[in-house]
Amino acid sequence: MLLFWDIRKSLLSCFNYNFNCLLTAFLYLVVHVSVFCPPCCDLLVMLSGIYALFFFLTVLVTIAAMLCKSQIFILLKLFVFINTIVRECEPSITKNISMASLLIFFSPCCVIVTELEKHIPDLHVLITTPFHPAYVTAERIKRAKNLQLLLTAGIGSDHIDLKAAAAAGLTVAEVTGSNVVSVAEDELMRILILVRNFLPGYHQVINGEWNVAAIAYRAYDLEGKTVGTVGAGRIGKLLLQRLKPFNCNLLYHDRLKMDPELEKQTGAKFEEDLDSLLSKCDVVVINTPLTEKTRGMFDKERIAKMKKGVLIVNNARGAIMDTQAVVDACSSGQIGGYSGDVWNPQPAPKDHPWRYMPNQAMTPHISGTTIDGQVLLALKSLPPFFPLRYLHSISSLAECNSNR
Ligand SMILES: NC(=O)c1ccc[n+]([C@@H]2O[C@H](COP(=O)([O-])OP(=O)(O)OC[C@H]3O[C@@H](n4cnc5c(N)ncnc54)[C@H](O)[C@@H]3O)[C@@H](O)[C@H]2O)c1
């Protein structure tokens, strides 16, 4: 699979550089030889035919390789999770799983969901992603008589009915710590987008407008603002570290206090009481998992306790928010801006109200799916399967971009 990537790279560079050079040289040759040696024309026509055939084949293989690009990360994930099985599961589970019985459902669009329904009674292992989750309901678990392992390709297994999985004796595993940098960076970006009122300016450009005042009246500097993270685990801590140079007042709320050294390094202050943190923050970022306790944690009453015009970033899970309460608060101005990549449910239906509420900067579930995030996800688990040099060869941003 990685070899294929390299083939694609060399084909593209051949196409971009070598081919252009060769073509230019060839055209020079045709013109010069035809002028000075007319009988050679037939030979040149034949050579042109061979060259055109070569070119046509190159284009075909390049297109095929480009189409395969989207499959590469799916395959990377596959290897990550096979490794997870080997490392994290009891031998009693893994020894019964043959590769033939490992059916994978990464993207449950309607066709694949139908496939999932069809195959679920035969599955031993089911791999799903939080990005486009196949909701593993109690009903599906009940039908999956052979299921032994549920793997999540990412962080957060709330799309799985964990109680039903536990009752059925299933192991649920996920790749913790995998794409946390990608999510933390994305959160920083969203904070700036909201604080600087970036999106209306962008829309003005698209719409051929120019109205500085319409943007500036609600654009601020981040410096000096109070920013709080609800949940300071892996992602929350990375965010606090990244916010430190912006000279904000940093607060965090979590079930657990951070290591004093990290508290000192980031300057973040612990707030034991959530509502106390919320009443102080200009910007609130949500970084808790979706659990029984956090589901609907931000309802109408809690949002009302926040500062008027508060900016909220939520890349954790959509269901931590009360959907309608967010819409109402964005409309009334209680929430000054809401941004995130997680929805309830996913994929968000076309009529999801968050698509149409004012002052939102929402995206599909993309914060953890950068190229670097996916390569890192693989790097954390792949070494037993592949020499690292193959992966390093695709991790440079310039290289990835030049291959688009
Ligand atoms: N949008 C994405 O692409 C994406 C990617 C990765 C993770 N996530 C989401 O982000 C969440 C956090 O990821 P992480 O890697 O930082 O997880 P983590 O387990 O390292 O951190 C979660 C933190 O939340 C705290 N917490 C849990 N319940 C709490 C509660 N009721 N009140 C206060 N604090 C509570 C925990 O103590 C922990 O410190 C994941 O569970 C997942 O839902 C989203």
Image: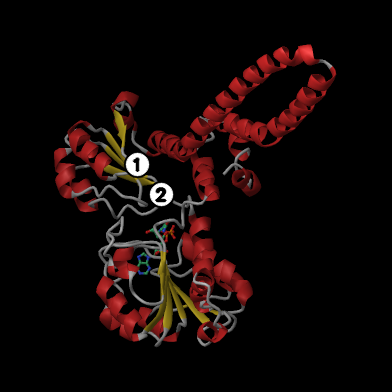
Instruction: Please state the horizontal and vertical placement of residue 206, each as a whole percent of the image.
Output: 51, 68
**Is disc 2 placed on a helix, strand or loop?**
loop
Which residue in the rendered view is the most extreme toward the right? 36
Q: How is the image coloured?
A: secondary structure
Which callout, 2 or 1, points at the residue further toward the start of the chain? 1
| Disc number for residue 154 | 2
**Is disc 1 placed on a helix, strand or loop?**
loop
Instruction: Please state the horizontal and vertical placement of residue 114, each as a whole percent of the image.
Output: 21, 39
Q: Is residue 137 left or right of residue 18?
A: left
Mark 2 belongs to which amino acid?
A: Gly
Instruction: Please state the horizontal and vertical placement of residue 20, each as a whole percent of the image.
Output: 70, 34
Write down the quadrant of residue 119 in the picture.
top left
- Tell me if residue 286 comes above or below residue 7 in the rendering: below
Q: Nearer the viewer, mark 2 or mark 1?
A: 1
Foreground pick, 173 / 239: 239
Asked if the beta carbon under badge 1 is closer than 8 A to the nearest atom of ligand 1, the reply is no
Write down the quadrant of residue 88 in the picture.
top left
